[in-house]
Amino acid sequence: MNEPLYENVFSEEMQKRLIEQYTEIARLAGGLAHEIKNPLSTIRLNMELLAEDLSEAEDSPTNRRALKKIGVVQRECGRLEETLNEFLNFARAHRLELEPSDLNEFLTEVLEFYRPKAKEAEIEIVKYFAADLPTVPLDKNSFRRAFLNLVINAEQAMPEGGRLVVRTRPAENGVAIDLIDDGRGIDAVTQQRIFEPFFSTKSGGSGLGLPTVRKVIEAHKGEILLESEQGFGTQFTIKLPGLVRLPSE
């Protein structure tokens, strides 16, 4: 009778150690990313100065070749810096400052911010917002970035334009947000891996966008679900807990 109890305690201790190890690794990785950014900024600055010097020098085949090589280094530095920024966002995605929020109002503001880009991409935004939703606790900065990441993914799935439906509705113990596009869809193999860190189907992509989205949503005590079919579009569903309304006295 005592053996299962001992095994359960041992399992809890092991789980605690793994969490501590993961936290330490994440802290070290974040520190390493910051350390890389400093010399990277120095490299970029010196490349810019060198490019200016060569642009002002006498035009020659040698200088033109050098400028092209400098351009390659600048682009790669920019890509590396973007990857580092995305990694740092991923590493700190669990640190939230929650405040009671009106979800419909919040999403309206975000979509209005995105609307000029949607018009440029010939994407029609359609809103179906349920009334009387419970208030939700949000870290507005991190959730805004996460939601915009999903919107941009939808835009990229509709390169020739399309329709993006954003729907809010009551869900068990909270609310749900459905983000539905009529784009190219996602194949079954990619769906299985789409939230894995560093997995990407895009050339030059960091593979940290959607994993960060999921991490932010899970830090809000929520979950994100995916349904997709190639040629018919994709639906992401975010479920968030609502704040319990206390009865008035």
Image: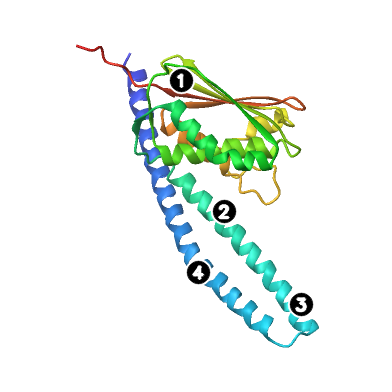
From the top left corner, tell me how far across and down residue 178 is, in percent.
56, 24
Q: CB atoms at circles 4 and 1 under 8 Å apart?
A: no
Establish if 67 lies above or below 222.
Answer: below
Q: CB atoms at circles 3 and 1 under 8 Å apart?
A: no
Given the image, on which type of amino acid does mark 3 rest?
Answer: Arg
The CA distance from mark 3 to mark 1 is 57 Å
Residue occupying the far bottom of the picture? 58
The CA distance from mark 4 to mark 2 is 15 Å
Neighbour class for label 2 at 10 Å: few (<14), some, many (≥20)?
many
> Residue tagged by mark 3?
65
Given the image, on which type of amino acid does mark 1 rest?
Answer: Val
> 67 left or right of 11?
right
> Residue tagged by mark 2?
83
From the top left corner, tell me how far across and down residue 25 is, in percent.
43, 49
Instruction: For marks 3 and 1, give the one nearer the viewer.
Output: 1
Instruction: For marks 3 and 4, give the one nearer the viewer.
Output: 3
